[in-house]
């Protein structure tokens, strides 16, 4: 017979029943708790204490927990070990009658984790894979940047694995009937590849039905696990493998393009040599360029033209490099806005990044080169965002967004009033008391407070005759030698004083979400600007390396001659 557990534990078991393939992190106050087998597993993997909980049954239920403020590191470790984690939050306010409502707000998997660090220059791709009669189709997405792409590859498992490993995919979504197994890659069965009209815009660049189905499979999986709209997803780009030099994984490893053969680290690779980028966005783009070399001569020459311009203009290049140092990862920051996990510090970073764009644009235009001007003109004016952030957000905001301390003084009248009430409540009461004494002529009138009756005006019985109807006093409590009254003004102030702090915190959060929603309208513009910054960063990096090492621009010929004069190995 099934043991009878407490209502809270029954709630947990109901949620766990629907998420049997995930570790359920169940929010209880300031902790995420895990129970039963999840607790035993997590306590071993995270090396945290396993305890027990009285849950209505005779035996104590195995339990372990982590503080919710620092949960991201624990979640990262579980996900790195190949687990899915279902985050269960409180959906209703505690204190109301009955058990607090709870539900899954997000399922975090190896392919969907948001890296908290903005210094991470690696993409985190999740893929979807569908098998068709003559080819495989792959869709890739990095939800931390919004990048989304699709490609068709020949029906060859080596080519398939090569593509997945090249993109460093952590998780592959497949239809249940075609589950693929790969070493070190989580396979996630999912059976909804129906086209989603709501996201029609991101499909505007692709027409291949196979690609649309596979991209839909990935999109629907992401919507299902993230439990929110993904407005930051970028227009899906088709990767045409005919545009790039195809290399198998062994060739790439032997050439040490992005990692060395000794320990698979960046040091000693071509990427290590060329990466003098100053932004995470630029570093990610450079890695993509190295892993997918162009084969179209005109496109290669365009890149070389811009690198040569930056090589020739040393002073402007140095200025550009210094400006880029002040730009945070706008690509990931803009995704956080749409995803809803941005904090006030992130907004300040967006502001400080956007503030330097006019100077960056001016430096680029000063070169007076058409190819550079084309890049510069894509750095559109976003000063309305920086002005709002600078006017509204304090200089050193806290990391949490639901505990106040975010909004500047004088930004919002209601907030200022609440802060004034909190900070000057005693002064107001003293002034109010004196005002009432002057109005009534009762020198012994006093304003007091107790927990049962709240704030009151106390008048001794000897002075009751001085209390006139026009004073609008309402009797609140009778004592042996005095009467206690309240006025609408005091009642209003009581309400404000007792709830000022709570109202302040809630109002600050409402204002913060309004800022977030306002900036969210420009998410795709921010992403476009981020892409331009990434390209500028890569170009200056390649130019700097070329100048420092006296690299010479190659000259193309059509006779298949490869002639190197006085060459030397860049790394060795």
Image: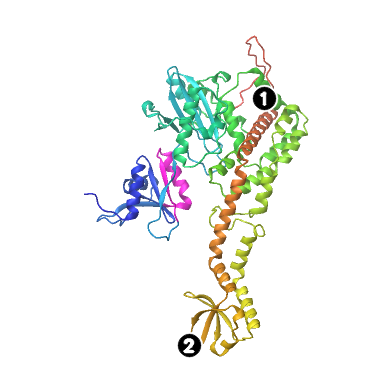
Residue 323 in view (yes/no): yes
Residue at 62%, 18% (x, y): give it. Answer: 296
Q: Is label 1 in a helix, a strand or a loop?
A: helix
Q: Which residues are magenta?
A: 66-92
Q: Residue furthest bottom?
A: 462
Q: Is residue 10 above or below residue 136?
A: below
Label whose residue precedes the other's in the sequence (1 or 2): 1
Residue at 57%, 57% (x, y): give it. Answer: 507
Q: Position of residue 378 (x, y in %)?
A: 69, 34
Q: Position of residue 329 (x, y in %)?
A: 60, 40
Q: Which residue is mark 1?
A: 303
Q: Position of residue 36 (x, y in %)?
A: 31, 48
Q: Nearer the viewer, residue 78 or 529?
A: 529
User: Within 10 Å of the Cα at label 2, are there few (<14), some (14-19), or many (20+) other Cα atoms?
Assistant: few
Number of numbered markers: 2
Q: Say left or right for 67 vs 433.
A: left
Q: Which residue is mark 2?
A: 480
Q: Say left or right for 513 vs 312.
A: left
Q: Would residue 69 be counted in the magenta stretch?
A: yes
Q: Residue furthest front?
A: 469
């Amino acid at each position: 017979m099934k043991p009878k557990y407490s209502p809270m534990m029954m709630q947990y078991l109901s949620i766990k029943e629907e998420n049997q393939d995930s570790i359920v992190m169940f929010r209880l106050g300031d902790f995420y708790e895990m129970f039963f087998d999840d607790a035993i597993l997590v306590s071993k993997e995270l090396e945290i204490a396993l305890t027990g909980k009285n849950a209505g049954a005779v035996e104590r239920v195995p339990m372990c927990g982590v503080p919710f403020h620092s949960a991201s590191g624990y979640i990262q470790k579980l996900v790195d070990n190949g687990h899915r984690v279902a985050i269960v939050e409180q959906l209703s306010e505690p204190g109301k009658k009955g058990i607090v409502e709870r539900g899954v707000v997000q399922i975090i998997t190896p392919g969907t984790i948001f890296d908290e660090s903005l210094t991470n220059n690696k993409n985190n791709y999740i893929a979807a894979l569908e098998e068709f009669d003559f080819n495989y189709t792959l869709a890739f997405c990095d939800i931390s940047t919004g990048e989304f792409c699709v490609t068709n590859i020949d029906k060859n498992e080596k080519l398939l694995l090569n593509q997945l490993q090249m993109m460093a995919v952590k998780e592959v979504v497949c239809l249940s009937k075609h589950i693929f197994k790969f070493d070190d890659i989580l396979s996630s069965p999912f059976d909804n590849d129906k086209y989603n009209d709501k996201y029609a815009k991101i499909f505007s660049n692709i027409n291949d039905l196979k690609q649309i189905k596979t991209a839909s499979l990935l999109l629907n999986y992401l919507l299902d696990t993230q439990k929110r709209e993904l407005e930051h997803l970028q227009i899906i780009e088709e990767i045409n493998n005919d545009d790039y030099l195809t290399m198998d994984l062994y060739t790439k490893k032997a050439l040490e393009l992005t990692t060395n053969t000794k320990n698979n680290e960046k040091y000693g690779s071509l990427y290590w040599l060329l990466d003098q980028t100053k932004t995470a966005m630029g570093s990610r783009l450079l890695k993509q360029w190295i892993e997918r070399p162009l084969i179209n001569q005109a496109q290669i020459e365009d890149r070389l033209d811009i690198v040569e311009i930056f090589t020739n203009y040393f002073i402007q290049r140095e200025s550009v490099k210094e400006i880029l140092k002040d730009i945070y990862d706008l690509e990931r920051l803009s995704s956080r806005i749409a995803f809803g996990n941005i904090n006030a510090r992130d907004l300040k970073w967006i502001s400080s990044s956007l503030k330097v764009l006019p100077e960056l644009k001016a430096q680029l235009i000063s070169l007076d080169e058409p190819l550079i001007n084309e890049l510069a003109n894509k750095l559109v004016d976003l000063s309305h965002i920086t002005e709002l952030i600078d006017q509204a957000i304090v200089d050193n905001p806290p990391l949490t967004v639901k505990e106040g301390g975010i909004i500047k003084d004088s930004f919002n009248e209601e907030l200022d009033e609440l802060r004034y009430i909190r900070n000057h409540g005693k002064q107001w009461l003293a002034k109010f008391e004196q005002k009432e004494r002057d109005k009534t002529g009762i020198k012994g009138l006093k304003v007091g407070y107790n927990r049962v009756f709240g704030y009151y005006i106390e008048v001794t019985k000897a002075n009751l005759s001085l209390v006139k109807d026009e004073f609008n006093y309402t009797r609140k409590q009778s004592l042996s030698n005095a009467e206690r009254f309240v006025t609408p003004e005091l009642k209003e102030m009581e309400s404000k004083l007792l709830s000022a702090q709570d109202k302040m915190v809630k109002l600050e959060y409402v204002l913060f979400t309004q800022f977030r929603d306002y900036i969210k309208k420009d998410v795709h513009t921010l992403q476009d600007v981020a892409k331009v910054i990434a390209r500028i960063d890569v170009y200056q990096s390649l130019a700097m390396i070329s100048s420092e090492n006296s690299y010479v621009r190659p000259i193309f010929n059509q006779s298949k001659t490869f002639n190197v004069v006085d060459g030397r190995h860049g790394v060795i």
